[in-house]
Image: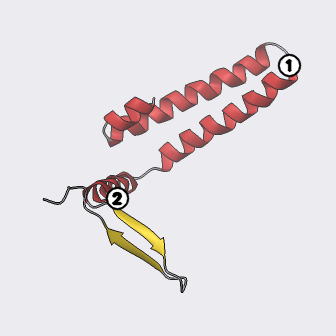
Amino acid sequence: MVLLSRVLNFRANRLANIVAGTIMTALQLLSLIATPPTLYYAFFSVIEIACTTVVVWYAWTWTRDQGALSGQAESLYRASPSVVYTEPNGSVSSARRSLRRPS
């Protein structure tokens, strides 16, 4: 799913996350109902159900603008990496550093 999240476009990515999260949540709920689970299985099932529910909710409320902003931020970071440091007086400064070797 991680690979698909990076490769698919916005609409397909959103749909894949909603479908996969819903199926995984339903299957985990069914596994708890089908047979009496052990205590540790029930504990980790609750965690998995909570996580997949959050994935579905996040994919459902995800807007195209959020994806565009994260893509822009990533491309800006790759284009101009910088170093952030704290001055002795407490202010925060940043300095660009070049990845090229001096000629």
Q: Which mark is residue 103?
A: none
Specify the quadrant of the image occupied by residue 2: top left
Residue 30, x across and y down, in percent: 71, 19
Disc 1 secondary structure class: loop
Near-viewer residue (82 or 5): 82
* 45 lies left or right of 94: right
Mark 2 element type = helix
State which quadrant residue 9 falls in.
top left
Q: Which amino acid, by three-letter code, is at mark 2?
A: Ala
> Which residue corresponds to mark 1?
38
The residue under the point 56% across, 44% down is 57
Q: Nearer the viewer, mark 2 or mark 1?
A: 2
Q: Position of residue 79 (x, y in %)?
A: 25, 57
Q: Is residue 65 left or right of residue 28?
A: left
At horizontal 34% and vertical 71% (from top left) the residue drawn is: 95
User: Which dot marks residue 73?
Assistant: 2
The image position of residue 92, as x and y in percent, is 47, 78
Q: Quick one: label 2, few (<14), some, or many (20+) residues within 10 Å?
A: few
Q: In the image, what residue occupies the spot 42% across and 39% down?
A: 14
Q: Is residue 87 above or below residue 35?
A: below
Q: 96 and 25: which one is in front?
A: 96
